[in-house]
Amino acid sequence: MDQHSRPKGYSNPILPGWNPDPSCVFVPEWGNTFFCVTSSFMIFPGLPLYSSKDLVNWKLGCNIVNRCGQVPELGLHDAQDNGIFAPTIRYHDKRFYVIVEYVTIEDGEASFGLVFSSSDPFDPDSWSDPVVFRQPQSILDPDIFWDDDGRVLVQAASFRQEIVQFEIDLDTGAIGPGRTLWKGTGGIAPEGPHLYKKDGWYYLLIAEGGTDLPHCVTIARSRSPSGPFEGFADNPILTNRNTSEYFQTIGHADLFQDGDGNWWGVALATRSGPEYVNYPLGRETVLFPVSWTENDWPRPEPVRGRMNSPFLPERNLGVLGSGQFVDEGDDLDFAVGSSLPLHFVHWRFPPENSITISLPGHPNTLRLISSQQSLDGKFKDGQGLTFVGRRQTSTLFNFSIELQSPLILSEKEEVGVAVFLTELQHACISVTWMRSEDDVLRPYLRIRQTGPCSDDDDLIPLPASPSGRIKLRIGAEIALEYIFSATLLDEDGRDRECCMSKTVPTSTTSGGAGQWGGSLLGVYTTTNGGLDKSEVHVSRWRYENLGQMISSTEVTRPSRNE
């Protein structure tokens, strides 16, 4: 297809994998570019900022939270569902602003708001340390809006089951008194507000029903930004609840215009079907066209896997950004002088200097130093987990790494690969050193599940390998299960013998304690609480996108012609 041809169709999700609570803005001054940011919760770097020129091909442009000092609280809390919730991105007076809430459920601790800003969205150093604001009562999902009179208004969800509003000073974080805007249409958890002005009306878009199957989008309007707001008679304007659609839990939407004045929306969704059991990619970002009625109410198109619009912008891959397109795979050999890719993440902050590329004597490897903390937790303030991963961004995939010899660890120490949702829900295959029945310290291969679908560990002695190299792999050939395997390699790096394999249901990393996010795929090493730390060297990191389920029966294959 020619780069400047105008397509009519596209497929959802546009931001696959862990990308919930999307907020987008179109900025003509930055080369007619769309920008979108999503929630990151407990992973670091956080607040991924994506960019696109055609609404279909999205590239990771920058991570807004890219320095530990910006949000040090990420390294201090052991809950699985704390962190950076529900951003809103807006562009005002040649500057980008992202407002979020840092949410904590720790006893005696209060959540607080953060406003990041930048004059260059693609420069990580340009993103500021946040202006912090604190409210008398905790809020969720803050939105920011500049009114015509210069006031800066924040709309947010209150735990009193209503949408509130207050003014904010963006220099100091000082806020004014709060006022109630709207309580929604009666659904639980009115949240995710966004305020817009169009043709003399102020529109308040919110989510209701909770972020599970009853999730929906509703809207109200007023002639004043502070209300009173009148709900639309045909609410909800967007939902897939009580349907058999593959895309479910649709809500937490944001609306924006393109350069031709056409309206679009984004929302979160899960590819679970109404069964809501297997959705390991978590809450993802979907795109839909929006039209307006004669009475000036928005009418979003229903969310499906295949979408059509005659107003889709011309195909254009010439977008800025240091990262890769969101549906690309990995083919990494950790070359000397290289750095971790922009889309790689950690669970909280990793231990200092625990992850290094190509040390002298170990070219083309990733060196990991084991942490005392394990995948299962045992977290202490600031200690950190040696884990580096990437989002699972395709339903069907192959992910693998190679472990280099010599691989000599301390007792109970392990190194492996994992599909990780939280410390309470994950599955892994690892090499671990344990004592045998005759009290000899030996290496074993182990496959282990943690969570509601847990099974007994699979454990076998590690077979001898002439090359000393082992490939650990996680894959998905169907949507309902992962395949974990270990393969011995020959001297030339070819597969020699598969010595262990097991399937694990993808429901292991669906919902539960990790209901906000999605599955990560990565490598880790831990002493499991022991004091003796070892170094391991990993090479040949591969992630291949094999296909994306866009309905219960249809798979799309990757096909970008550069």
Image (spheres, rainbow, N blue to C red):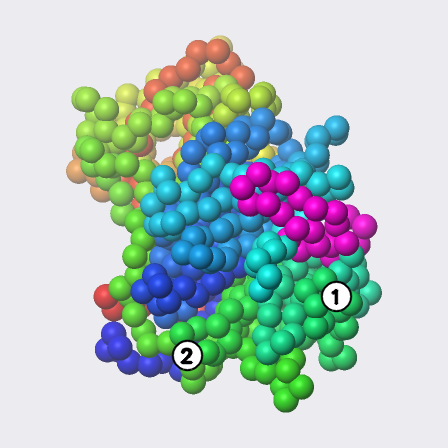
Magenta stretch in the rendered image: 154-179
Question: Which quarter of the rendering shows the C terminus?
Answer: bottom left
- State the image quarter where residue 492 is shown: top left
Amino acid on which disc 1 is placed: Gly
Q: Is residue 335 above or below residue 4?
A: above
Question: Which quarter of the rendering shows the N terminus?
Answer: bottom left
Give the residue displayed 61% in from the left and 56% down from the top.
151
Q: Is residue 239 above or below residue 157?
A: below
In the displayed structure image, the side of residue 347 where residue 186 appears, left or right: right
Q: Which residue is mark 2?
A: 260
How far separated are the C-alphas under marks 2 and 1?
30 Å
Which disc number belongs to residue 227? Answer: 1
Question: Residue 334, how many percent across, how many down?
Answer: 25, 37
Q: SS of the residue at dot 2?
A: loop
Question: Residue 50, how many percent across, how many down?
Answer: 41, 56
Between 555 and 282, the one nearer to me in the picture: 282
- State the image quarter where residue 247 is shown: bottom right
Q: Is residue 534 visible?
A: yes
Between 88 and 544, the one nearer to me in the picture: 88
Give the residue displayed 75% in from the left and 69% down from the top.
229
Give the residue displayed 53% in from the left and 29% down from the top.
72
CB under 8 Å between discs 2 and 1:
no
In the displayed structure image, the side of residue 219 where residue 398 appears, left or right: left
